[in-house]
Image (cartoon, rainbow, N blue to C red):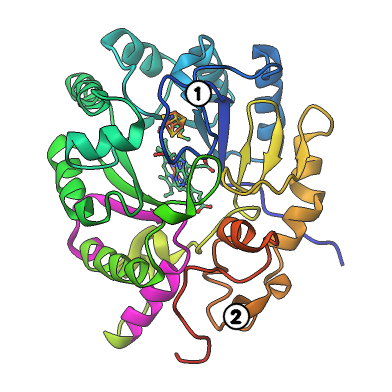
Amino acid sequence: MIAITNPPRLIAWELTAGCNLNCVHCRGASTSSVPEGELTTEEAKHFIDEVVELGKPILILSGGEPLTRPDVFEIARYGTDAGLRVVLATNGTLLTPEIVKKLRDAGVQRLSISLDGALAKTHDEFRGMPGAFDRTLAGIEVLRKADFPFQINTTISKRNLEEIPKTFELAKELGAVAYHVFFLVPTGRGEESDEVSPADYERILHWFYDMQKGSEIQLKATCAPHYFRIMRQRAKKEGIEISVKTHGYEAMTKGCLGGTGFCFVSSVGQVYPCGYLPALAGNIREQPFKDVWENSEVFRKLRDPEELKGKCGICEYKKVCAGCRARAYAATGDYLEEEPYCIYRPGKK
Ligand code: HEM
Ligand SMILES: C[C@H]1O[C@@H](n2cnc3c(N)ncnc32)[C@H](O)[C@@H]1O
Ligand code: SF4
């Protein structure tokens, strides 16, 4: 039998590991020092050529802080011309009208702005810089004036858990087209002691389900695969079928796309299932991207739910959830082990 591999739907690309901030939770442990040997402009363009050979995913230009890389506009333009939907993830502190114009001219379709609290103190402590909150809000103001679409990304940890509803309200007031929450993964500078408890995860994901129902803007939980279990448990209780009509995009996807619909490429060309799981699939300098995507052992394992261990392995929701592989890795050293932050006991329904 010939195994058919779907092309990636989304690729997050760390254009540079360098950053102007020093966030307490940063997966890349980014600082102002830029590592040696990052992909050159030519190598970056070559990578885009290779991506297009496989399919037309959304290309997320990320970092580090992608706006610290001078050729970011040239790379974005190249991706746009190649037919990709190019978006960019930024901390928002470096946005000026000139930069926003250049991003628009390069065909960038949306920005994500990280905002980790509704209060300046919370965000600034997260971001390791006094004044970061004000600068990010100033950046958002530039986007509003230019009528440039943006979403707000918030990483949820113990530091801001109780401020999430307020941050969601702020995102709406600011005119975000979507609100995406990321649950902290203990990797890089991210600390396990900052992770919210499994019970709090459950609580906030139920809140999220309720918010999603009546929300005029798109809400998405990333790195919280158990949301897809909760969605099904709640829908069953309410007697509703899960469909695109009732649950939108969430009905068509699953908990974690790492290695199946999504991958992360580091600034030196390393390919990983996501930016939080240091399980190396290959390097685009050594192998064609297609070969890494289709044949690497890590990706093959992640595509097979039968490989899952512990309670995830026997869970009736494993095909829609599969747990966070990065959290399993951080807790045990084995990315196929059970998700440590899920309270569900398989078989309970
Ligand atoms: C349009 C602007 C967007 C930006 C700038 C953005 C940014 C990001 C970033 C930076 C990550 C983290 C990647 C990593 O470090 O590993 C991420 C993850 C992800 N995003 Fe977005 N995103 C955007 C829109 C979307 C949309 C519209 C969707 C789907 C409807 C989406 C789905 C995902 C998924 C599935 C992941 C991967 C995490 C996982 O494995 O579940 N994103 N996004
Ligand atoms: C793309 C998003 O990823 C967030 N981010 C950075 N590091 C981590 C981590 N360890 N866990 C979860 N999210 C993280 C950023 O704050 C940004 O909003
Ligand atoms: S989370 Fe983003 S803004 Fe913060 S240090 Fe890391 S790369 Fe920089």
Do the residues under discs 1 and 2 have CB atoms within 8 angstroms?
A: no
User: Cβ of disc 1 within 8 Å of ligand 3?
Assistant: yes
Magenta segment range?
Answer: 212-236
Which amino acid, mark 2? Lys
**Dot 1 or dot 2, earlier in sequence:** 1
Q: Is residue 309 magenta?
A: no
- x and y percent of residue 341 in the render? 47, 68
Query: For residue 311, which numbered disc appears in the image?
Result: 2
User: For residue 234, which quarter of the picture?
Assistant: bottom left
Classify the position of the C terminus by image quarter. bottom left
Q: Nearer the viewer, residue 129 or 256?
A: 129
Say if residue 113 shows up in the picture: no
Q: Is residue 226 magenta?
A: yes
User: Cβ of disc 2 within 8 Å of ligand 1?
Assistant: no
- x and y percent of residue 13 in the render? 57, 32
The residue at the point 26 percent across, 41 percent down is: 177
The residue at the point 32 percent across, 54 percent down is: 158
Q: Residue furthest bottom?
A: 348
Left or right for 313, reference 200: right
The residue at the point 50 percent across, 63 percent down is: 255
